[in-house]
Image: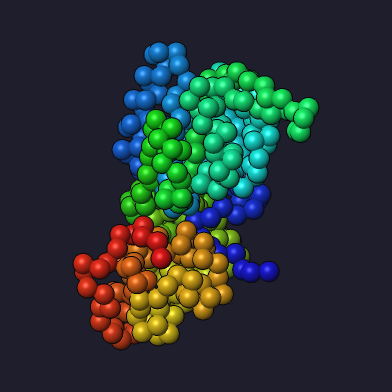
Amino acid sequence: MARERIISGSAGGNDEERFNESLRPERIVDCVGQERIVEQLLIAMKAAEQRAEPLEHVLQSGPPGLGKTTLAHVIAREMGAILRITSGPAISKPGDLMHWLTEMKRGDVLFIDEVHRLSRTVEEFLYAAMEDFRVDFTIDSGISGRTVNIALQRFTLIGATTRTGLLTAAMRDRFGLQFHFEFYSVEELTEIVRRSARKLKVKADDGALGLIASRSRGTPRVANRLLKRTRDYAQVRGDGTLSRKTVEQACEILQIDALGLDELDRSLLRSLIQTYNGGPAGIEALAATLGQERDTLEDVVEPYLLQIGFVIRTRQGRCATKAACDHLGLPFAGPKAPPEEQGSLFDED
């Protein structure tokens, strides 16, 4: 079994889900960071409340671990609604959705994680549900089959995605509120870790909390996971109190460096610099070289490396920057593509 990747923004198993649940803010005023999203959401919720209407459908996008699921919980709690949670891969046909849609009461919230992974058939089935709050559902099949028009209660659909570009324009346009989550600052993460430490009853000084925040890749889920691991280290190897030295020692064992990069990050950079002479290299080639899935590199590894300027994406592929070479102590071979040929962060190979 592969070792758990501490700095991954992806959710872990059931134990970690319960751990994250206990640390989530319960009200929107308790949320740290994402100020623009919070401000827009406060206005939208207040307006919906004054009109006695459910909140508009919400689309959340951004790398994993930035609080999309947490915000869905907060929205449901603020609106006094019941939250029902599912995911795109779990819905293979329209019938799988009917169980959720027919149980929804007025104002309830349906959260679909990885909404970009819905099949085209299911997506088109959702259009009428989102716009008209009615669906045409086929009962049985063949000659005896018939279509029944079913009225639904007005509900709020919250979709979360790490790959907005994979959503069709028709699907995106049906979300009245669209939010993109940004990485958090060290100051914001420090406050999140401080609150989590209080909930976990962990004694920690400001230096330790700041160090955890600085190595958390701008991601709250990573920060809480790293807090949990350093707490274990302090309990076993120390007196249970988190100090800056304790966090540094724990991170050394976890192979997490000063910028929050772990061995997979460094392996990708070394492969790009040494094997592909700094790039450009296609994502499929990098995935094959590292023995990783393409989605893992694109959704979990690349976003932070792009954010800190260690990797750039061009039409020809990925290129390592001088900053990446300096961080690893490797020679820089120079730029491989002129600026006018460099694509955006969201270009596809």
Query: Residue at point 49% right, 39% down?
Result: 159
Above or below, 333 against 177 in this view is below
Query: Residue at point 59% right, 39% down?
Result: 122
Above or below, 209 against 141 in this view is below
In the rendering, at what x and y percent does residue 345 appear? 33, 59
In the rendered image, which quarter is residue 279 located in?
bottom left
Could you tell me if residue 133 is visible in this image? yes
Query: Residue at point 65% right, 44% down?
Result: 92
- Coloring scheme used: rainbow
| Figure quadrant of the N terminus | bottom right
In the rendering, at what x and y percent does residue 303 appear? 40, 60
* Front-most of residues 267 and 101: 101
Taking the view exactly as shown, the residue that stands out farthest to the top is: 51
In the rendering, at what x and y percent does residue 285 appear? 48, 75
| Figure quadrant of the C terminus | bottom left
Image side of residue 111 versus residue 260, left or right: right
Taking the view exactly as shown, the residue that stands out farthest to the right is: 144
Image side of residue 142 versus residue 251, left or right: right
* Front-most of residues 306 and 126: 126
Could you tell me if residue 244 is visible in this image? no
Count of marks overlaid on the render: 0
Query: Residue at point 56% right, 75% down?
Result: 291
In the rendering, at what x and y percent does residue 116 appear? 51, 46
Above or below, 151 against 307 in this view is above
Image side of residue 132 versus residue 273, left or right: right
